[in-house]
Image: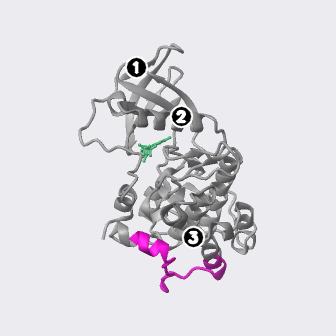
Amino acid sequence: APSPKQQEKAKATPPDPPLPRQNSKTTPPSPPKVITDKNHLLEYQRVGFLGEGGFARVYEVKDVRGTRLACKVVTKTSLKTKKAKTKLYAEIKIHRSLAHPNIVRFHDCFEDDQNVYMTLELCHSGSLMDMLRRRRRFTEPEARFFLVQIIGACHYMHSHQVIHRDLKLGNLFLDASMNIKVGDFGLAALIENPGERKKTICGTPNYIAPEVLFDTANGHSFEVDTWSIGVILYTLLIGRPPFQTKDVKEIYTRIRDNNYEFPAERRISSDARECIQAILTPDPQKRPTLHEIIASPFIDFGIVPQFIPLSAHDGPPDFR
Ligand code: ADP
């Protein structure tokens, strides 16, 4: 069976329309060792490689003061189509409008002849996906801590009319103090008119809400992020996503049928189970609001740690 990593990478969506992401097979040339922002007379020294996604490569850079940042690089050759440009501009427009302690801060963007660059807050400690791989699963207090921060970021986005649409462990980064930083606004949508519905089928198979796949006539809205938060909570506590299986079509069938289980060998509290079940309600109108999740017994009656110790990277902390 594919690992969760492979599942996350498998960004294939059902037949059409195709995912608004490109996957070029050829490796583009590296950006220059010194990246120059001509408009602001700034220079960034490229000091390391952080990772790559569907259409960007991300480097660690250092500005003249020695401050370290992440720099997301998109080659102009991948921006030949109008669609690709529109998509990148949407990501930039949305991401730069957001400022919240649990959202990767957008610093600036500029270009040279080869690439478009976005400088972002650096997240030193990888993603929750990397950490889950080491830990296998998290304790309930840790899950509460992460959930409260994710919901804080999500509530902020929604109150700024932004739907993230790709919340998943691989897009939840951690800073040096183990705080969540939501990143990758590549699939985010701005709701410009109240009541507007989105129709594009997008997301990552394991985390896609049923209405995105099966209510294409009606479209979807903010509740798709709530669904993903339910998938995230399940994954943090059980160790793998609820609808996971090797065949993407079968994942969609399971999502359609709300077919998932709580394996008996992973003992989780009934409050946690009820919280997950409430969030993974197929009808988006019946799903709890973000406030209701925060007020649920799982969060309200349980230990929510003030912080997560760094030791949690490798083993469960002892919260009392
Ligand atoms: P894409 O939009 O192409 O999917 P992402 O934004 O997901 O690209 O970034 C790709 C990878 O780069 C991530 O999986 C992560 O490893 C790394 N990365 C992205 N942003 C940051 C950041 N702010 N700090 C540290 N690493 C990052």
> Mark number for residue 92?
2
Q: Which residue is drawn at 24% across and 43% down?
A: 25
**Mark positioned earlier in the residue sequence (2 or 1):** 2
Front disc: 3 or 2: 2
- Asked whether residue 59 appears in the rendered view, the answer is no
Height in image: 143 above or below 186?
A: below
Where residue 248 appears, x then y in whole percent? 36, 66
Q: How far apart are marks 3 and 2 (CA)?
A: 35 Å
Q: Dot 1 surroundings within 10 Å: few (below 14), some, or many (20 or more)? A: some
222 left or right, relative to 43 = right
Secondary structure under badge 1? loop
**Mark positioned earlier in the residue sequence (3 or 1):** 1
Residues drawn in magenta: 251-274
Residue named by callout 3? 139
**Mark positioned earlier in the residue sequence (3 or 2):** 2
Q: Find the residue positioned furthest to the bottom.
A: 264
Q: Distance between the residues labelled 3 and 1?
A: 46 Å
Secondary structure under badge 3? loop
Q: Dot 2 surroundings within 10 Å: few (below 14), some, or many (20 or more)? A: some
